Amino acid sequence: MVKSIMIVGVGGQGTLLASRILGNTVIREGYDVKVSEVHGMSQRGGSVVTYVKYGDKVYSPTIDKGEADLILAFEILEAARALPYLKSNGTMIANTGQINPMPVITGAAEYPENLAGKLEKKTNLIKLDALSLAEKAGNIKTVNVVLIGVLAKNSEIPYEKWVETIKETVPEKFLDVNLKAFEIGYNV
Amino acid sequence: MKKLLLGNAAVARGAYEAGVRVVASYPGTPSTEITESIVEYPEIYAEWSPNEKVAAEVAIGASIAGARSMSCMKHVGLNVMADPVFTAAYTGVNAGLVFCVADDPGMHSSQNEQDSRHYARASKIPMLEPSDSSECKEFTKLAFDLSEKFDTPVFLRLSTRISHSQSLVELNEREHDELKPYEKNPAKYVMMPGNAIKRHVDVEKRLEALKEYSENAEINKAEINSEDIGVICGGTTYLYAHEALGESVSYFKIGMIYPFPDKAVIEFAKKHKKVFVIEELDPVIETQCRALGIDVIGKERFTLLGEYTPALIKKAVLGAEIPDDNCLEESLPARPPVMCAGCPHRGTFYVLKKLGLTVSGDIGCYTLGAVPPLSSLDTTICMGASVSAAHGMAKARGMEFNKKLVSVIGDSTFMHSGITGLTDIVYNKGANTVIILDNSITGMTGHQENPTTGYTIRGEETKQVNLIALCKSLGVEHVVVADPFDIKEFERVVKEETNREEPSVIIAQRPCALLKRVKYSGHCVIGENCKNCKMCMKLGCPAISVKDDKVVIDKTQCNGCGLCVNVCPFGAISKED
Ligand SMILES: Cc1ncc(C[n+]2csc(CCOP(=O)(O)OP(=O)(O)O)c2C)c(N)n1
């Protein structure tokens, strides 16, 4: 069995760190794993997608439509964009925060209304305002770790394994605030 | 110990274990992290060279001098370095020499989708292609062994999904750290006709030997699961095909694309009723199979464009339908990449757009000056073309056109291949205005140092190219430095310089907003006296948008760079802590 997780967001939001924390946590459980990242042009404020797959043996690092067990979305429009990739019984975790893409800013397109409501009708949605939770943790830059916390809660991987990875990944200086952010996310 | 590594980091690890001593590269997605990872190994000399041609030559020289060496580049970088590479095929090597090239099917971050596998045959250099990080490391080591065994440079070909996917890699020790003796050998290394004619004979002999090797190489391997369907694939498509078709078909995994294992593939094909060739981009394997008389199914079922997926393969091989999407009824606005908040290029393009100039563009973060609302660029071809193509435009259309024409080129790109174009303008009596967008870093590829920044790849201080003195020494008499955030002055300078009937250079100087030392603070706010003229909206700043027909600045996006403060005609925007 291979588990497929997709992390989507906007370039610059820290999705890469999230996928690396996830990847390094699942290897603690002895799984084979592949993490497919996005670097370069699209990181400049564009839609970014990373895939994490783990199981006994993983071949393709990418995930096809209808194949993701779980999608972690850092932004709600990106959640909607990723919906076709979710399995019919999959779970979507979405930050309700909204970042306007350039076509919306220039007036060429409109930001769709009530995306969370619409997604709820189509899927098993866990929504949260990760920015305010990150503020509560003490640093708005911990949005990604708050979201990792929610993901952890919805995975079968034990709590301590996540904490071990965070301790190894995050610089000493920022460790406390990140652990707090993880905790808050875990308890959403 | 097993570690989760990017394909690129695994190549670096392989090079380290293989005893590499010199790595010279020019950045380019998706290859950049190979050389960045090399920096983790203090034993290895690493550099960012000014361009790929220089990088390849550094590696070739180091190999001749006895050190295992490597040069890494993106696919289009291989075009730039093709000249020395084709002749290095003739000289062969002293210590192992590997050129690692990363293609970008799907063009995640590139201006074309070329298939670099063609280079192997064209240059007569063997090429290996790994499928995951573990193979990235092993194939890199093998490439160095083959290089020395057969006295040839070796290509390692990657693609975006291999370079930028992490998978598990077993780490080993550095195995080999020898500096081979250097001996003068003009017959081998001085490629003038008399010598090169003889070396060409050796090249053809070597290819025969390599062909023999390829036939029996472990990295070209058959996995027989079925008598019905056989799939010939390699690199990414081995993974996608396995995911899609599992054990229901047989596989021939091509690890060495060139020379091709002809006999082994003919044998494999004989064992199956139907044979598919699955490869992204061009029909390289397919053409070879057809030349061998093998009846294969290839590009008549598979696209020449973009990346493949397991679903696409399932459909083409098994006829499996791709299920309907579960999606929202409405169409969603796209999210193309944008210049960051605080990007210095924004000021430049705001002015160029305002003046309605023709902009001969180039490659870097500033290529984003092509998208609305800045919509300034007229062309983008390849690195350096902004300067030389503008010279051609001016020669084609004359002085009046020239006065409404500028080139824009980043600092790294100017050092890469803008200097020769500027030389051409001066030499051939052009009168172009070239704007060097000096943001003190190679931005697009993720912040690499370059000859204008004053630091090496390891962050050590070094001499910094003086752009003013450089341009003047080429014969450009009018070289002006201007701050693109000082909109009024910048506009004045652009008007003055484009009006001249002589070559001129404007150095638009302001560092990238993402550099650690750049400390914008606070954020901008819109005051009561906003007339809603939407002038600031023309900046295309991701922090400024319209809500309920009022302009608003998003605090979480704004970094307080203050460009909008300078643009507002009513002084309605101010900075707050
Ligand atoms: C021949 C070639 N090599 C490398 C690249 C990858 N690449 C694209 S733009 C760029 C450099 C951009 O740096 P700079 O000119 O300083 O502009 P910035 O992105 O900082 O604005 C590189 C290395 C390429 N497109 N073509």
Image: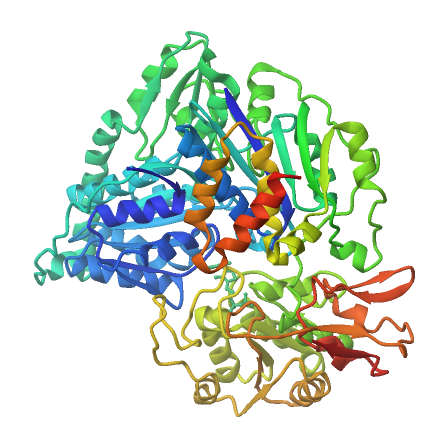
Residue farthest toward the top in the current orientation of the protein: B227
Between B160 and B98, the residue placed more toward the observer is B160
Between B561 and A24, the residue placed more toward the observer is A24
Q: Is residue A141 above or below residue B130?
A: below
Q: Position of residue B146 (x, y in %)?
A: 21, 41
Q: Is residue B352 left or right of residue B418?
A: right
Between A91 and B407, the residue placed more toward the observer is A91
Q: Is residue B478 left or right of residue B181?
A: right
Residue farthest toward the bottom in the current orientation of the protein: B477
- Report which quarter residue A161 is drawn in: top left
- Residue appearing at x 70%, y 52% in the figure: A132
Which quadrant: the N terminus of chain B? top left
- Residue appearing at x 59%, y 89% in the figure: B502
Q: Position of residue A69 (x, y in %)?
A: 61, 27
Q: Is residue A164 above or below residue B338?
A: above
Q: How many marks?
A: 0
- Report which quarter residue A184 is drawn in: top right
Q: Is residue B49 left or right of residue B144?
A: right
Between B413 and A129, the residue placed more toward the observer is A129
In this rendering, does residue A12 appear at all? yes
- Residue appearing at x 86%, y 83% in the figure: B570
- Report which quarter residue B172 is drawn in: top left
Which quadrant: the C terminus of chain B? bottom right
Q: Is residue A103 above or below residue A119?
A: below
- Residue appearing at x 47%, y 54% in the figure: B76
Colouring mode (rainbow / by chain / secondary structure / one colour): rainbow
Q: Position of residue A183 (x, y in %)?
A: 58, 44
In this rendering, does residue B122 appear at all? no
Q: Position of residue A56 (x, y in %)?
A: 43, 22
